[in-house]
Amino acid sequence: MVIEYYFNEDNAPLLYQRNATYYVKKVFDEVLSESENDDVICKIYHIIPLLQEKTLHHLIRSCLHDKTNISCYNSSTLVMTIENKNNLLNTNVEHEDFMILEDPMNYEEVFNILNNRTIQKLKMQGVFFISSKDVYIAPEVTIEKGTYIYPNVEIVGNSHIGENNFIGPHVFIANFSCGCYNLISWFVGKDSHIGNRNQLGPFLHFREKVILEDDNVIGNFNELKTVNMKSNNKMKHLSYFGNVTMGEHNNVGCGVITANYNGKRKASIQIEDETFIGCNSTLVAPLKLNKNAYVAAQSVITKDLQENEFAISRPELITKKRNRS
């Protein structure tokens, strides 16, 4: 038995590289491992399978029963062939069952077929779609019942959405998981996890490694990267947090920036519970704000604040009489 795989994954869309390779190898390996036909040669060339797994199993088993060889080629005319020692047969497989993905003209058609199947499956499981026309859900994504998906949403990768969430409009998430009762709109996030009852967006970006627990509000034009945040925090607009660990019941004012990179290495910032950080402040890492610390607006904090400590580094205000000519 000889099995050859020719997947030109560099030319395939990122969303399908892993999925297509895994799917085809899995089915062929399972079936061929059951076969006692040592003469079988299986060759697959950069093909996207649209068959249901059960149907693909049946097709391959039928071919093996006839002691034929199976090849899937990258050709604009030949989709699948079944070969035996005497002749070469072109099988007329349904157009929506096997499609090559070499020609860019086929991309949209393939995406629509897979996406429609995924959306129909999710609807049967109790997921609501306001309008599925501009929604893409990758086949490996799991979404639980009671969740509403709004227009212009794309969910890919190893993502899991819990029950009763509101996702969208205008959301892109990859390798992202969330609990229940979250409200997410105008949001881009990857490689992150949130708990329950969080409000995210609009115009919010989770770059990577963001973990939120419950009941947080992260609002307009914020960016987070490598942040671990507990519950009941508010960060409503125009701030950047990087390499931050934060406790509970904190308030982050507008325009707060963490300076966590000195040009050579990154440092971290730890914020305990019940702190208040005023608008337009800069927190320079490494730094620790202990419980109930208070940072006045427009301050630059370069050393640790102790519990119940107040910090202000704002320049002195100078006023002078105007001279009018």
Image (cartoon, helix red, strand yellow):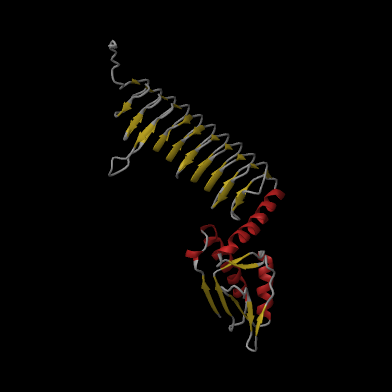
Q: Quadrant of the C terminus?
A: top left
Q: Position of residue 84 (x, y in %)?
A: 64, 85
Quadrant of residue 299 within the rendered picture: top left
Q: Is residue 138 above or below residue 90?
A: above
Q: Position of residue 1 (x, y in %)?
A: 56, 80
Q: Is residue 270 left or right of residue 69?
A: left
Quadrant of residue 284 within the rendered picture: top left
Q: Is residue 267 above or below residue 115?
A: above
Of residues 121 and 31, which is closer to you in this image?
Answer: 121
Give the farthest residue toward the right. 124
Q: Is residue 15 above or below residue 91?
A: above
What residue is drawn where x is 60% and y is 51%? 136
What residue is drawn where x is 61% and y is 82%? 37
What residue is drawn where x is 41% and y is 22%? 292
Q: Position of residue 17 (x, y in %)?
A: 52, 62
Q: Position of residue 36 (x, y in %)?
A: 62, 80
Of residues 78 and 72, which is closer to you in this image?
Answer: 78
